[in-house]
Image: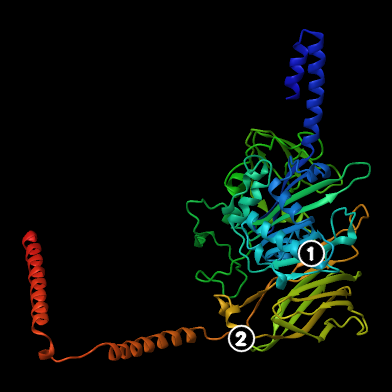
Amino acid sequence: MCSLLQQVAQGASKHNAMMFLTFLYLAACLVLTTLATDYFERLDLTPLPLGSLLASFEFRSNETLSAYNSQNFRYFPRSLGQVLQHADTKELHLRFSTGRWDTETWGARPWDGTKEGGTGVELWAWINAENEKEAMRKWITLNQGLSGLFCASLNFIDETRTTKPVLSFQPAGTHTQNGSLHLLHGVLPGEVVCTENLTPFLKLLPCKGKAGVASLLDGHKIFDASWQSMSVDVRPRCLTGQECLVEIAQTIDMVLNIARAKRPRGDPIPRPVQPHELICDETKSYHNHETCYPVDALETPEWSLNDVFGRPVAGACPLCDEEGPEAKSLCLHVPHSQGVWIGAGGFEVRSGPGEREKRCWQLVPGERFDFDMPKTSVRTHAQLDLTDELITAERTMTGHGAAKGGMRTVFTNPSSKDPVDIVVFESLPWFLRPFMHTLKAQITDTGFPSEWEVIKDVYYRPAVDRKRGTQIEMVLSIPPSSTVMVTYDFEKAILRYTEYPPDANRGFIVAPAVVRILNQVDATGNAKAIYIRTTSLLLSLPTPDFSMPYNVIILTSTVMALAFGSIFNILIRRFVAFDEVPENKLSKIVKTSRFRIALLKERIMGKAGKKE
């Protein structure tokens, strides 16, 4: 558009027209340049061992605070902005997650776990309110608005599923009225994430998934992944000497199995590997032509964007910045020595010295882009130097029976010299009642003295039956090269029969624990947030036999019907002898009966004649 206006200005004959068009050209170029920097998108592809692929989509846009307050939306989605303004929400974090991140194989989590939520749906927000009662009212309003916007069951996050974290979460934005902000957190671990949540997510984007890297997002591919997480973050951001902004960041991270993703949509059923394609470990003593112990693949199969996502990139989004450091919309994290065949529609830019090796492409609007990745040796993935997590966490339930049990969480610090301080946040349902006097931490390794203080601080907010759940926040110190086991006992409450879900015998899902690693800094020396979430748990409660009420109802209804029918006939029906009936009434009944019999016989004979 800028070049077109320049040509018109250069071709104008009159001086006034020339000045006017030149001014229009400069103003339009300035506006377009300003608007272009307000939207950014990026896709990072990282090959993982064992034929897996990590795809991280990032979409970020912002709006000035003055335009946001006056509802003058440009790139910021109006539907979400009005919900946040109505609920007086200053900062929002929403997560949709399925699957489990395999730390041992895939390394550290993307975004240091800050864009990941627990299994199901997780939501926390900072709400401006004068007191806790008003904050809870606005919290319910926010949940109901987001429930309709994202087609999720967020309206079920009521007071029993709401907590108020103290140590686990810190605001990511710039807030001026910290005293009146209330942090509320809710989670639905049993919520199933599916395509109906992806469609509203795409509608929040400026290009609506029609162009840019968002054109690769397909529900069939995303929800067939081994692990998947969608996030929406809204925060205020104020820079020195500039007007404050309201920023929205949307991300989708997923781990795809390349071999499974390459299956055609018309034939989605997985097929067993043919015997001649199996790679067997011949060192096993029981190896023969009938028994095969498979080993991990030595090569990653060849793939392309069309193979993995079912389509190429439909050109760049026209609203993205076409120049500058953020113009590269697609990056592939592979060594420079790895050969990659690229097509038209993109300009390649490689990382410089001292940076992690990767290849990025600047896409062209309206031009499809794809590349072919040849077979890669497993040793090539080792060159990527996948970082390990600072700590690993595993949480399980112990005990047996339907009355009592225990919770056990195991933390492992792989570092040989540095201890790790963490904050563990657990949100338990009200019908799981922990005994805090049984809380203890034990160092299972023998290399450290027993006086090492593992539990530094504990914040405990007890539950109130049918009103709120239990909140536990613990500050722990994990010594180097050691494993710490934290345990406590609990008892299970008995619910009313109306409080059981339809699948009560399956159990109740307990939300994952949130682990925040403290005292971490990035390359520039600023504080960095790192989060880890454990897997969800399945709690079995004392469950009555719901078939017995059904049987009792059926049997009682049958007995009541028979008894009522018999008694009603005895009380109402009157039995008389044949000779007691008046003659005129009896003859009338006989004539009516004979007429009906003759009419019925005539209809039957008529139908039989038609058939013949």
Q: Callout 1, which amino acid?
A: Glu
Q: Residues within 10 Å of mark 2 (few under 14, many from 20)?
A: some
Give the image quarter of residue 570.
Answer: bottom left
Residue 576 position by quadrant:
bottom left
Nearest the viewer among 453 and 413 is 453
Percent position (x, y) of residue 254?
Answer: 67, 56
Q: Nearer the viewer, residue 416 or 402?
A: 402
Residues at marks 1 and 2 touching, judged by CB atoms closer than 8 Å = no
Q: Is residue 569 above or below residue 111?
A: below
Q: Nearer the viewer, mark 1 or mark 2?
A: 1
Image: 3 above or below 577: above
User: Does 495 appear above or below 323?
Assistant: below
Can I make out residue 363 in this image? yes
The quarter of the picture where the C terminus appears is: bottom left
Instruction: Find residue 542 and name its label.
Output: 2
Residue 191 percent across, percent down from the top left = 63, 65
Whether residue 229 sits left or right of residue 481 in the image: it is left
Residue 242 x/y as whole percent: 90, 41
- Residue type (three-letter) at the residue carrying disc 2: Pro
Residue under the point 77% across and 38% down: 327
Q: Is residue 540 above or below residue 289?
A: below
**Residue underneath mark 1:** 134
Rendered image coloring scheme: rainbow
Q: What separation in Å lies between label 1 and label 2 (alpha carbons)?
A: 36 Å
Residue nearer the viewer, 242 or 389: 242
Name the disc covering residue 34, or none: none
Mark 2 element type = loop
Where the N terminus falls, by quadrant? top right
Quadrant of the rendered structure where residue 610 is? bottom left
